Amino acid sequence: MSAAAAIAVRPLEAKHRPLWEPHWAGYQRFYKVTFTPEVIDMTWRRLMNPAEPMHALGAFEGEALLGIVHHIFHRSTWTIGNYCYLQDLYVDPARRKGGVGRLLIEAVYAAATKAGAARVYWLTAEDNAEARALYDKVASFAGFIQYRKVL
């Protein structure tokens, strides 16, 4: 049995917050951002609220959380079905290149398919070569460049 076969991807539950927080902090360190406690609390409340379009999945090996992924469903002017934005993906550095990231992405694909979404998409840093090596295997590069204005 492969190492990935022992990993179960399932929705995070309220009891998982203490496991989620170190991964969320690692994600912030990687992208050199810091969220206020208020933003972190609101994010968690949204992820746990079934009325919200935001969702959180975790890759578990037994009770150990190896990685997280957040995804959001939203409407599009281009399709009838919603799009699914894979917003955040983080895998414990010690568990990278072992199939955890792929399992999390595939779980988002499955959730999006079940929800009738027309597309799953995401952004990553241009210099995130390690992640892009995986992304090039599981999706196609759209060639778009992001612009933003912080308000």
Image: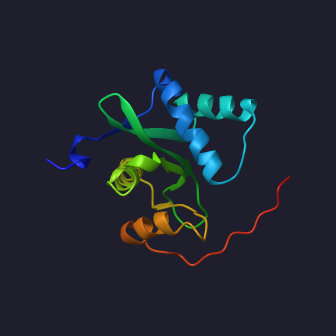
Q: How is the image coloured?
A: rainbow
Q: Is residue 115 visible?
A: no
Q: Nearer the viewer, residue 137 or 79?
A: 137
Q: Nearer the viewer, residue 26 or 141?
A: 26
- Side of 116 where 90 appears, left or right: right
Q: Identify which residue is drawn at 44% across, 40% down.
A: 57
Say if 46 sits above or below 107 in the image.
above
Q: Where is residue 107 in the image (x, y as percent from the top left)?
A: 36, 48
Q: Is residue 150 visible?
A: yes
State the count of labels: 0
Q: Quadrant of residue 135?
A: bottom left
Say if 141 sits above or below 35 in the image.
below
Q: Where is residue 136 in the image (x, y as percent from the top left)?
A: 42, 72
Q: Where is residue 53 in the image (x, y as percent from the top left)?
A: 56, 41
Residue extending furthest toward the front:
94
Q: Position of residue 95 (x, y in %)?
A: 38, 48
Q: Quadrant of residue 8?
A: top left
Residue extending furthest toward the right:
151
Say if 119 sits above or below 44 in the image.
below
Q: Identify which residue is drawn at 67% across, 33% down.
A: 40
Q: Identify which residue is drawn at 58% across, 35% down.
A: 52
Q: Identify which residue is drawn at 45% across, 55% down.
A: 117
Residue extending furthest toward the bottom:
143
- Side of 58 where 21 appears, left or right: right
